[in-house]
Image (cartoon, helix red, strand yellow):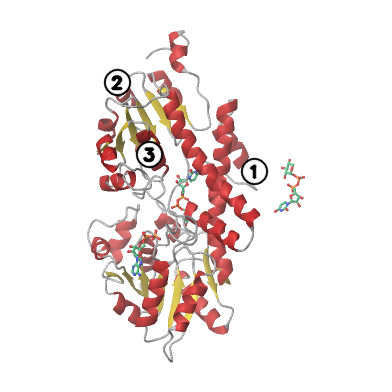
Amino acid sequence: MKVCCIGAGYVGGPTCAVMALKCPDIVITLVDKSVERIAQWNSDKLPIYEPGLDEVVKKCRNVNLFFSTDIETAIKEADLIFISVNTPTKTCGNGKGRAADLKYVESAARMIAEIAQSNKIVVEKSTVPVRAAESIMHILRANQKPGIHYDILSNPEFLAEGTAINDLLNADRVLIGGEETPEGHQAVEKLSWIYEHWIPKQNILTTNTWSSELSKLAANAFLAQRISSINSLSAVCEATGADVSEVARAVGLDSRIGSKFLQASVGFGGSCFQKDILNLIYICENLNLPEVAAYWQQVIDMNEYQKRRFSQKIIESLFNTVSDKRIAILGFAFKKNTGDTRETAAITVCQTLLEEGAALDIYDPKVEPEQIIDDLTHPSVTESPEKVKKAVQIHSDPYSAVRATHALVICTEWDEFVDLDFKRIYQSMMKPAYIFDGRKILDHERLQQIGFHVQTIGKKYQRTGLLRSWGIVPQL
Ligand code: UDX
Ligand code: UDX
Ligand code: ADP
């Protein structure tokens, strides 16, 4: 069998790499319109950072996994085509700011219709709203050449960045949605056969196309909702003296609730959660279900509130002014083990501090410096990109980033931050030295003993400076 995948990004890349690893009898060609991206996939420095991906790609590349810009040949030769192009939120026109922009999906479908000379199974792999498969089908069937048959399947991807290879190798489930016709069932069987190379058959669920598409949006909406729920309680904790980690543990031990995805944070980011919920909201509004739309809108509103609340806390703690103060930002990616910054909470934190006149020293182990500057100078973030460029310095080492700063802010939960030498950091910072732990990863008691003023999410700390001056907390 020959497989082609259109779109060599965060979804297409790891998915095809694992498929190639597990299916030596299948030839997979990953195509992209970006010449630069394909060149990177064919080089030693892959275009995305994902633990374990390098090894898998090295093993399969030019064996049964090929990266190419020759989209036409790949489509012509393939029996099965995955569409895994990007589906960003629309920035203009109808549904602006909410609906998914399907222009890349549509253009991929049109390309297939134009080029195909034999029957194809077309698999929608991008996260796209309910009924996207139907749109792909309309395009393909309206441009159908005689004797060519198309089957359209929905096969949403559930991998999370940073753990993509493991998520693909040990998927909780694989979901395949198809048409309820004999041809539809056959197409589902063919795609299922690929996954059966490594996924137990009982974990491969088949549904109708719409259920499959909606399940993807629903899964992401549920996950994001858990984070917004615990984040909402983090505000209650800070106001009352409860500790959100203790609350999360107590709640998560209920087997009906479960302990995962209850980590309070500065706010969720990533390319999926917000986009998918906005999409769900848009669909509900169009289906005249305003109450349902309003329900899910709260998940996003709570996330925005959390990001704003954390940023405000930094400013308030620093005597209500950060103007001309240097602040170190440790971590810029939307989560650890990825270099991806899409929708990262760090952007909101940095934007708020920059607007208040702070100078920022930013360090992230995997995000490219140009990406940070691009994100912070984007028109949606600032009207004065030149000013931002002057106020932001990117560092390649955390110790250089914190030197002579008034405060250190943790925006991403990178493991290496836990093991930093905080005594050394304390000595090199301005006093009083503040730490704002937006990920709850540091040992706050110890930091206070060193002399830091510590603020975090979901727990109120005493003002150690005052306690120390009363002789209650010893100076180290
Ligand atoms: C609940 C909590 O489960 C329990 O831990 C707490 O101590 C008291 O409140 P209870 O109200 O007795 O217990 O019953 P529960 O099984 O939680 O059901 C509550 C309601 O939710 C019922 O009306 C039930 O029919 C409904 N429900 C429950 C659903 O509609 N769907 C479900 O999936 C589960
Ligand atoms: C998500 C889904 O998990 C995945 O199934 C889907 O295919 C794509 O979207 P991803 O966005 O890559 O994956 O990462 P995820 O681990 O879900 O984290 C999303 C955001 O939530 C991150 O910013 C993360 O830091 C945050 N998060 C996660 C929390 O703040 N608390 C948690 O308990 C878990
Ligand atoms: P995702 O996170 O959904 O994988 P990415 O932006 O990482 O999104 O990847 C999507 C990829 O799809 C990009 O590399 C983009 O160049 C590619 N792409 C978009 N439209 C087309 C198209 N019509 N033909 C080929 N590649 C495309």
Residue 254's label in the rendered image is 1
Q: How many marks?
A: 3
Q: Quadrant of residue 126?
A: bottom left
Amino acid type for the residue under numbered disc 3: Gln
**Residue 183 seen:** yes
Q: Which residue sits at x=31%, y=72%?
A: 64
Q: Earlier in the sequence, mark 2 or mark 3?
A: 3
- In the displayed structure, 388 sits above or below 91; it is above
Q: Quadrant of the C terminus?
A: top left
Residue 322's label in the rendered image is none
Q: Nearer the viewer, residue 281 or 220?
A: 281
Residue 427's label in the rendered image is 2
Q: Nearer the viewer, residue 81 or 310?
A: 310
Q: CA distance from mark 1 to mark 3?
A: 38 Å
Amino acid type for the residue under numbered disc 1: Asp
**Residue 1 seen:** no
Residue 254 in the figure: left or right of residue 388 = right
Q: Count neighbours of disc 3 (C-alpha within 10 A) and say few if under 14, some if 14 to 19, many if 20 or more.
A: many
In the picture as drawn, the residue positioned furthest to the bottom comes out as 146
Tell me if the residue at label 1 has its CB under 8 Å from ligand 1. yes
The reply to whether callout 2 and callout 3 are in contact (CB within 8 Å) is no
Residue 181 in the figure: left or right of residue 72 = right
Residue 248: x and y, percent?
A: 58, 38
- In the displayed structure, 237 sits above or below 96; it is above
Q: CA distance from mark 1 to mark 2?
A: 44 Å
Residue 82: x and y, percent?
A: 41, 71
- In the displayed structure, 431 sits above or below 471; it is below
Amino acid type for the residue under numbered disc 2: Gln
